[in-house]
Image (cartoon, rainbow, N blue to C red):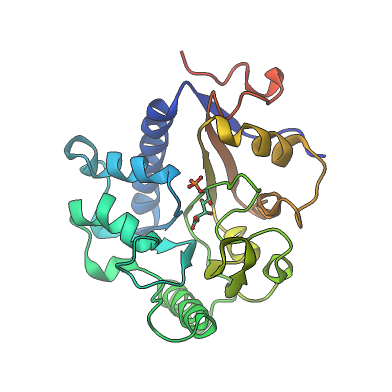
Amino acid sequence: METNHNIRVLNDAATLNLEMAATMARLSSDVIKQRGVCTLVLSGGSTPKSLYALMARSDWRTKFDWTHTSLFWGDERSVPPDHPDSNYAMVKKALLSQVPIPADNVNRIVTEQGTPDEVAAVYEETLRRQAAAKADTKQIAMPRFDLVLLGLGTNGHTASLFPHMAALRERERLVVASYVEEVKSYRITMTAPLLNNARNIFFLVSGAEKADVLQQVLYGPQQPEVLPAQLIRPSNGSLVWMTDQPAARLLPRTATASQVKP
Ligand code: 6PG
């Protein structure tokens, strides 16, 4: 059982969002200075909605260089882009409709482009092609994102890597489609090898309902088939757990004592 995690515990969801937004703004600014473009993988679900809305706020949107920020999605539901369940639709409403990001910088998973498997294959090709172009080479084995934002489901899933899915054991593919019994729908998701190749991964975990699963993922036995979030261990990058006090309630005090911001 790994015990030394990089955990930040903020007082509540509002301060967690402020700290997350400040961290993303600082990191993306540094990356753009160094490499010209920041590639950012967004999470879906409900937790990050308020973060995206904060980033879109007039006093925050100018802290990001949208012209040099490329957005991607870690996963998507197999629904049209204007469907209420669409992660793209959620980000468009909260963020994209409010900030001056060029359309070419928005790389959504184009769910209306065929079967879920075809959609996954097209997205994988898009990722490979963009990474190769950026590196000015023919073929990139594994794209490397600058910043990946992930959520944590109460069942231990992240992105759309759900317990006991075959996709958990994928070692070659970057993006796969799976029928998820638990949610009775197809999902398209980045795979663990692709996510783990990122430079900076942040889990954003907020609320009392996540306390149990967060404690299990971080301090329980290693069982990634049951708790897929345990698959996320960057091979050459950083992993930070951004949480609030309600979500961190069950973590050992040593893990969080110095972390709670005044
Ligand atoms: C999705 C997300 C998913 C999400 C978790 C947590 O498509 O739903 O990518 O992995 O991050 O389910 O969701 P909440 O933030 O809504 O708890």
Is 160 situated left or right of 43 in this image?
right
The image quadrant of residue 14 is top left
Question: Residue 117, relative to residue 228: is it above or below?
Answer: below
Question: Residue 48, relative to residue 76: is it above or below?
Answer: above
Towards the viewer: 96 or 115: 115
Is 106 situated left or right of 215 in this image?
left
Q: Position of residue 196 (x, y in %)?
A: 62, 58
Question: Residue 256, relative to residue 138: is it above or below?
Answer: above
The structure residue drawn at horizontal position 28% and vertical position 43%, both measured from the top left corner, is: 53
- Quadrant (top left/top right/bottom left/bottom right) for the N terminus: top right
Q: How many marks?
A: 0
The structure residue drawn at horizontal position 37% and vertical position 80%, both measured from the top left corner, is: 112
Q: Position of residue 143 (x, y in %)?
A: 53, 69
Is 146 situated left or right of 184 in this image?
left
Using the rendered image of the protein, determine whether residue 40 is visible from the camera's viewpoint. yes
Q: Residue furthest front?
A: 184
Is 58 situated left or right of 86 in this image?
left
The structure residue drawn at horizontal position 80% and vertical position 50%, both measured from the top left corner, is: 223
Q: Position of residue 4 (x, y in %)?
A: 72, 33
Using the rendered image of the protein, determine whether residue 71 is visible from the camera's viewpoint. no
Q: Position of residue 86 (x, y in %)?
A: 38, 63
Towards the viewer: 132 or 10: 10
The structure residue drawn at horizontal position 57% and vertical position 34%, both measured from the top left corner, is: 209
Q: Residue furthest top?
A: 262
